[in-house]
């Protein structure tokens, strides 16, 4: 019988195939990122114990995707979750959710829509000056924290949370303004095409590790990912070495654990490990 992680992987492959198909329809270059890029190169698919998928688009392509994808997904069992499509969703990037599933995440309790997902990150131009970089990141993190707090994101569940009333219209309006301010900070250097570097500002990695040259993310190559063929940066060795050092070496066994999901409901069944 498939394990929980294997069930999650099968659904995520469907999400990834749908995302890649949409990008092909829209003629948008996308690329694997982070652990998904590592999995594609080291394992030709998922890292066996990893339970998420990360993809990225340069900001202009990301904005085009967000504008066009909802109509293309109409009538399907997929939902494009963004700060505007789900008023309870606090994160600064998009997710493609499978509507036929429900999940609960570890250390992430909130009222946003739930389903097995893949993460879709925008890559934004950043300044070359280190002080300006720190200023941009500081503003982003401050706004991000305020949004998370106002949308009641918690590390652990609290029975009293279910007694809270929904956000009032004025609270929704206020948090939407914060979301707009956050996006303005993320995109403040976007029009300066002389800037050679972009960054995933929502990255979990140290700041310098996930800075890319525009050239790194526009020179792409097809790579196998399980039974799919998807896009990855041609300079994946440089990128993965920057992120992980010797990325061919497996981590210690005690670190080979899934990070995100505690509970999954699919096919009218509840699954936990």
Image: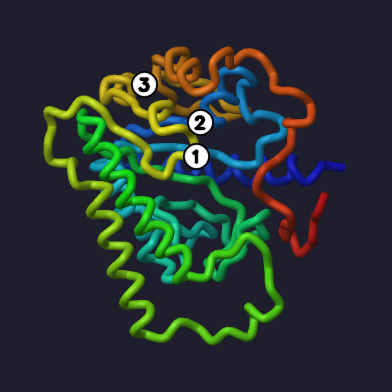
Q: Which mark is residue 147?
A: none
Q: Residues within 10 Å of mark 1 (few under 14, many from 20)?
A: few
Looking at the rendered image, the disc whose residue lies closer to the viewer, 3 or 1, is 1
Is the C-beta separation of discs 1 and 2 under 8 Å? yes
Nearer the observer, 81 or 1: 81
Q: Earlier in the sequence, mark 1 or mark 2?
A: 2
Query: Which image quadrant for residue 236?
Result: top left
Q: Which residue is mark 3?
A: 220
| Residue depicted at 40% across the width and 59% down the height | 82
In this rendering, would 100 be left or right of 270? left
Q: Secondary structure at mark 2?
A: helix
Which residue lies most toward the right here?
1
Which residue lies most toward the front here?
131
In this rendering, would 186 be left or right of 16? left
Query: Which image quadrant for residue 129?
Result: top left
Q: Earlier in the sequence, mark 3 or mark 1?
A: 1
In this rendering, would 152 be left or right of 8? left
Q: Residue 221, percent across and down?
A: 40, 19
Q: Which mark is residue 204?
A: 1
Q: Residue 139, percent across and down?
A: 30, 52
Q: Residue 111, percent across and down?
A: 55, 70
C-alpha distance separating marks 3 and 1: 23 Å
C-alpha distance separating marks 3 and 2: 15 Å
Q: Which residue is mark 2?
A: 34
Q: Secondary structure at mark 3?
A: strand
């Amino acid at each position: 019988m498939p394990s929980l992680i294997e069930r999650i992987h099968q659904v995520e492959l469907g999400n990834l195939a749908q995302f890649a198909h949409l990008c092909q329809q829209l003629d948008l270059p996308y690329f694997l990122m982070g652990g998904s890029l590592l999995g594609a190169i080291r394992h030709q698919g998922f890292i066996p114990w990893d339970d998420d998928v990360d993809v990225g688009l340069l900001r202009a392509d990301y904005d085009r995707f967000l504008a066009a994808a909802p109509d293309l997904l109409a009538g399907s069992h997929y939902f494009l979750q963004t700060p505007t499509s789900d008023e309870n969703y606090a994160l600064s990037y998009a997710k493609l959710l499978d509507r036929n599933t429900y999940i609960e995440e570890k250390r992430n309790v909130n009222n946003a829509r739930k389903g097995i997902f893949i993460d879709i990150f925008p890559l934004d131009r950043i300044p070359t000056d280190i002080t300006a970089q720190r200023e941009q990141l500081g503003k982003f993190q401050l706004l991000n924290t305020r949004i998370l707090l106002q949308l009641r994101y918690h590390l652990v569940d609290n029975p009293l949370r279910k007694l809270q009333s929904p956000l009032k219209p004025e609270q929704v309006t206020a948090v939407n303004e914060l979301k707009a301010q956050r996006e303005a900070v993320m995109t403040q250097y976007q029009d300066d095409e002389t800037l050679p570097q972009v960054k995933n500002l929502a990255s979990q990695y140290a700041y310098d590790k996930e800075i890319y040259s525009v050239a790194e993310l526009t020179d792409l190559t097809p790579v196998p990912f399980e039974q799919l063929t998807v896009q990855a940066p041609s300079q994946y060795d440089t990128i993965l070495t920057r992120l992980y050092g010797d990325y061919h070496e497996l981590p210690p066994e005690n670190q080979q654990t899934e990070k995100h999901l505690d509970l999954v409901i699919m096919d009218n069944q509840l699954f936990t490990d």
